[in-house]
Image (cartoon, rainbow, N blue to C red):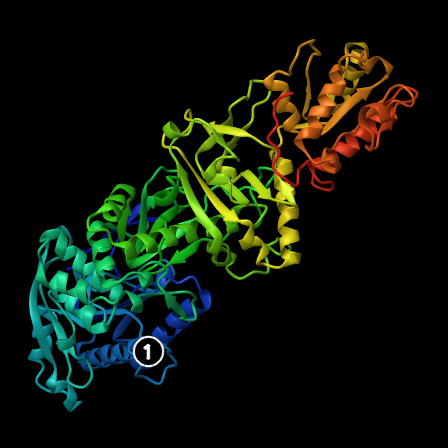
Amino acid sequence: MCPKHVLIWEYGKFSMQAPHETQTNAIIVSCDIVGHGAETDLSEQVRRVSELNHCVKATCGPHLATGAVWASGGDGGHVAFLDLALAEASIELIKELFQWANYTTGITNTEQLPLRLSMHFGPVCVIEGADGRRQLVGDGINIAGNLVAIAPPGGVLVTSDLARYIISINKWENALFTKVEFLQQRHIYLKHSRKITTSLLHIPSIIDATRVDNQRSDRALLDAAKRKGDAWETLYYAKRLLQVDSTDADAIGAMSSADPTRMSVEQSRAGEYRAHPLFSQFNRQSLQQFIRASYLIERKDGEIICSQGDTGDAMFIPVQGQIRVVLEDYKSEDGQEADDHPADIILDKGHVVGELALALGAKRTATLQAVGNCALLAINYQAMQSLLDMKPVNMRLQRSFKEFLLSRTLEHVCRTAPYLALEDGSPFGQVEEPWEVLADDAELLHIDWEQADCISATDEAFAHPGLYILVAGAVIERSQSANVPKNLHSKDLPIVFANFPGDLVTPYHEFQVDSRLDHSGISIIKVGDRAFKSLGPRLFADVLDGLRRQISSQFVFDAFISYTRNDAHVAHSWLEAMEKAGLRVYMSKPEAMSRFKPEIELALVESLVMVPFISNQAKGDGVRDSWVEREINFRKTLFDGDHCNILPVQLSPRVTEHFADGFSSITVSGDGEAAVAEAISTIKSVRIGTTSPPFARKLLITRTL
């Protein structure tokens, strides 16, 4: 019964007041649109809820002011028929809602809508809500709310209390309702261990309960999924059965009958589908082996599967529910929160996600969250390797999986690397799925840090002309010092080597795996020059421009100052001015020695512009070259003569030809401020990519003088 009085907070104090109505038995019809919260299209949400309300209003409209109460829940709700003379109207409402969800009404609905429906007969109280409308309270509505949450889509779940009441009615105005049946009786436990008996409502020619399972067993649900032709649901329930019994004949049979060429994924909200990027390349044996090697992960609505920045070695394929892909802490180039933060992505059943962690051992690039209750097939690196190495070798599986991971890694690079990113005006901005073009001449290279003491462009693995991008791990220059910290990290997708003979070749480097950060090694993706050239001369030229800008950003220094002791005072004043202007400058102390220090060699390689101070004092003695002359000559061995980026500063008249003939020089006059400003402007134009960085047209290996 409803309480005689309830505690109300009013006018700054509590007071005991009587509720507006007493407890009464009611027929409660409940409905819930499955997955409504996952729908990102607002217009679709509005359409669904509007049509649902139309159903309720068309059937119950005359009664809502007197004998019935509509309690909306946003994506569903409850209608409590307080006047038991309206029992026929409750069945009519169920009929209308069922037909609406199964697109047999006149309401415009383009697809079958998963709708949960339930009915219960029990006690409720009606009180006045905060907005003045009637609100349902009590045991009856509590059971109804729990019941609709477990109702099977495509059927109507009813309690034994409702069934007994309907059966007790002796007379129906509609003869069809005299044929109402209640099938598949089952005992269930609701929250707080409350046991109730349920069944499925069956009305011949209208609601067919024989096609719906009320037992909720994996075996029955597997059969239902097979009847629907839902390949992903079939895999899900087969996997659940195999978790309990690895020899389950029904599950093994379901997997054996799965045709990988018919497995597809939805590509757009318009319902367009395409072949599965991985499974469609499998044969039946490969698919079965993959599913056997995978394991099932189940998460509830809103739970985090993994977070951006987490370590991980598994990839996932949703087989039930959806996954939300969220890019956390998306920053613009200046480090601020970006205005164009990419929208979250909702992935439906069949999509592959997290594959970069498996392929590259990379940290998670996004946060994955369950949308609704979801289940995922997961396979980690160790299980995948065991599968690929098993005897006899499944060549189809090996080839398919290798090609898939290569394609996904290339897609990641094309979408993420700033020098290739899929944006308007970028090299690949007008190429549809450029990673598919590049895959024809690409390879993913994995290098173990214990087996790679030296990584250089002369190694056999890097001898093929093309582009080599670091996609996992980190490397350091073997000869680097604290003063010349040359290192590359895969989070930036840096260029390790670029070798386009006749067009662009990066300086020679010798790298080693930076085991301080990653003990597993590195991964480098190679894209041959043939793949880029297949895009055509105009796009190939755009790619080269983008690569030059990227190469500029990877130099350690903007300027290398070369001078002799006699010109040290001028060099130091220029160093101060350049650093004040924000330039990164290397300047060593001249030393009399037969060969350069490795640090100086690397600094010459890693400077966008060389700035030698030339004067009469900087000339050699005729027997051996001066320090400045040696550094200029060494710079010329690193890069093409026209692309050395040597900017001589002339302190004495008519000496440029002796030191750096063919290079435009800056002449110092007066206090030298104008010359410094001109040099800074020239260097900055190289740093921002307006002027080309130093490069060669062929591989030059010289690194010692």
Q: Which quarter shows the N terminus?
A: bottom left
* Visible residue check, residue 336: yes
Task: Give 578 or 45, whichever is nearer the viewer.
Answer: 578
Q: Position of residue 472 (x, y in %)?
A: 43, 38
Which amino acid, by three-letter code, is at mark 1? Cys
- Tell me where residue 239 sits by quadrant: bottom left
Q: Position of residue 554 (x, y in %)?
A: 60, 34
* Visible residue check, residue 373: no
- Measuring 42% from the left and 42% from the top, which residue is drawn there? 445
Does residue 239 lie above or below 688 as drawn?
below
Sort mark 1 into few (<14), some (14-19) or many (20+) by Cα contacts within 10 Å.
Answer: many
- Measuring 23% from the left and 48% from the top, which residue is drawn there? 387
Does residue 246 lie above or below 464 as drawn?
below
In the image: residue 703, left or right of residue 67: right
> Helix, strand, or loop for circle 1?
helix
Q: Which residue is mark 1?
A: 55
